[in-house]
Amino acid sequence: MAETPKIRFGIIGCADIARKVSRAINLAPNATLHAVGSRSLDKARAFAAANGFPEGTKVYGSYEAVLDDPDVDAVYVPLPTSLHLRWVSLAARKKKHVLLEKPVALSASEFEEIIEACESNGLQLMDGTMWMHHPRTAAMKEFLSDAHRFGRLTSIQTCFTFAADADFLENDIRVKPDLDALGSLGDEGWYCVRAILWAANYELPKTVIATRKPDLNKAGVIMSCGATLTWEDGKIATFYCSFLSNLAMDIAAVGTKGTLHVHDFIIPYEEKEASFYAASESSFDDLVTKWVSQPSKHVIKTEIPQEALMVSEFARLVADIKFNNSKPEKKWPIISRKTQLVLDAVKASIEKGFEPVDIQE
Amino acid sequence: MAETPKIRFGIIGCADIARKVSRAINLAPNATLHAVGSRSLDKARAFAAANGFPEGTKVYGSYEAVLDDPDVDAVYVPLPTSLHLRWVSLAARKKKHVLLEKPVALSASEFEEIIEACESNGLQLMDGTMWMHHPRTAAMKEFLSDAHRFGRLTSIQTCFTFAADADFLENDIRVKPDLDALGSLGDEGWYCVRAILWAANYELPKTVIATRKPDLNKAGVIMSCGATLTWEDGKIATFYCSFLSNLAMDIAAVGTKGTLHVHDFIIPYEEKEASFYAASESSFDDLVTKWVSQPSKHVIKTEIPQEALMVSEFARLVADIKFNNSKPEKKWPIISRKTQLVLDAVKASIEKGFEPVDIQE
């Protein structure tokens, strides 16, 4: 059997994150960098030169030119969120599959338009949540799904914070109301909410209530916030995200029979191995002076970094559509939309003075 | 200089926890077991025999008899919370210093009567929150107080859960509305709230809001609950406590410059050493594919277990009063009261249908 040809990627926009994803496309065995476009041809050229683009890569002075290139199978869209609807719609019209940075949209209803644009053209849509594709994530999920070792999820606490520098707080797209208007909630909160939904088998919470005292910048963009999510079955989740605290990325999930801890769930401490801690039916000694056993550390190795595994999974789905007449995998846009729905509810709760907001599917 | 005589303890009630504290009194170099009283003389005898009480220990068939023993300097009170006010008041009248199990009272106003009974008699009052006395706690506090390594506290998430067995859920005093009426909140939530206040330098939060969907038993006692606490400066805290989940006891504290993680803060995994993880000014590599450095593990050894250190600190204060005419150390009842004030607010928020409750000093 002949080897399936590699999926050819075009990148629209030279955002910082596109450097990492360019490398990932190079590393993914079934993908190749084909084109990059920027509003400035010089910027696109410099980006291609600095980021290991292969000889013969097409370099364009506009995003449109990338979309018009008939050899581009799929585009990676690292543009500011406020531009997602416009550029994904155009990409879909040109029959390009879309790997889309998160947050996927400014609201779930806007994202529904994006889904519609891709679906109606038979195109794969996937968001850029890299940690979903790390083999550690599958290993953790196996533990969380184990009725004997973990039981039923009762509580999950997540956080993602980092200390942005002065330049970021002044100039980054994530502090600008006209670009990534959801700020820390859209950028960091996205991961927290995704982790919560992931642990809850993507069952949406019934009610979301934002934590008082979020930090907003002068333009009203969220610099830090938190929320509590509750489900009908009594399960609860809390998260906290901030541009104004030291780097932290935790999941602490508690079940009726087990616990899971991980402190680097979004970006592992090391690129080629990652770990988590699991405990089952933990107990004390007779006098309650110590634990009978400690949580066990599970180390998962990966030769290919998580972002390349993401590209590879996306390219595999695209190739299946292109060469095998398969349908797009709906799972990915579905979980993107659910994540966005929860972000919308957190934002609405903040805007309503921290009132509880029920989520409507 | 002659060695200071040991402080002589009387124990009123043969609760399970009294076994651990009896051992702790034996281990503390400046304390000695002098008497134990139960409502049944046989039970008191059996307890003394089983728990290493020295020859010559007084064994009484009533609590009153312990309080009437003129050689008892201090009493340890492991009775159900609903009995605290009555028995501490009687103990204070008999001039006994009081080491009191937590939760210290059913409400802060009730605890204020307990404080008054002790203060007006010049007696030391301390609650039985053992982890406060572990040297690890001091080491963690040193880190949290370091402006360069940790910065300003911005968020803290704590939990304490354990999976109670069927007998506990049916018969333990902590599931009975007439005994430890605060249930999981009073038992486990106490530690979570204490950890939060401890990290916040005992600054009370402005607002407390209980999480929806607490679990109540048929008698209306809390089996699991959570809450979010907020301060004027934007600091936030969340906690979760439950009798219905696997054993977990976490602190995740995030500051502007550092993070602290500990997963066994109440009962260390091992009796003679305990650890925590600290990180400062954490960052990623250039491409954001890994961390530049990982949190560091700090191991603190202790020859004497934390409960014996608690007894020893309490006995030291009592000896200072008894032999050096010192005044009681007010710090301990002050932080007990603040902890109770927050529990009151959580309970009030649950009763008000999860409305925010402002804390009044």
Image: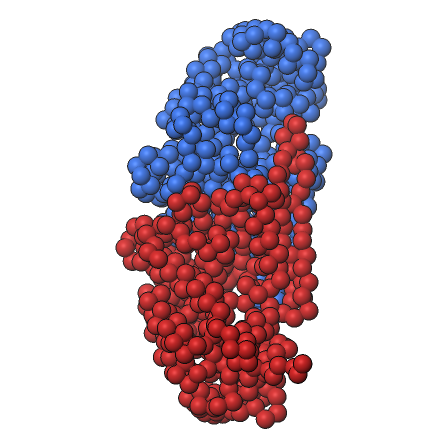
Chain colours: A blue, B red
- Looking at the rendered image, the quarter that the N terminus of chain B falls into is bottom right
Residue B288 in the image: x percent, y percent?
63, 30
Could you tell me which residue is drawn at 57 percent across and 65 percent down? Answer: B133
Report x, y in % for residue A294: 64, 59
> Which residue is rendered at x = 62% and y = 76% of the image?
B28
Q: Is residue A344 left or right of residue B199?
A: left
The answer to whether residue B95 is seen in the rendering is: yes
- Count of number-bearing discs: 0
Dividing the image into 4 quarters, which one contains the C terminus of chain B? bottom left
Depth check: give the residue in front, A207 or A224: A224
Report the residue at 41% width, 88% height from top. Answer: B64
Q: Is residue B350 visible?
A: no
Image height check: is B98 above or below A245?
Answer: below
Residue furthest to the left in view is: B352
- Please provide percent x and percent y for residue A92: 47, 15
Asked which quadrant contains residue B284, the reply is top right
Q: Where is A271 relative to B86, above or below?
A: above
Question: Where is residue B95 drawn, in percent x and y?
Answer: 44, 83
Report the residue at 54% width, 73% height from top: B317
Answer above or below: position of B297 versus B169. Answer: above
Q: Which of the 4 image quarters holds residue A181?
A: top left
Could you say which is closer to the camera, residue B291 or residue B236?
Answer: B236
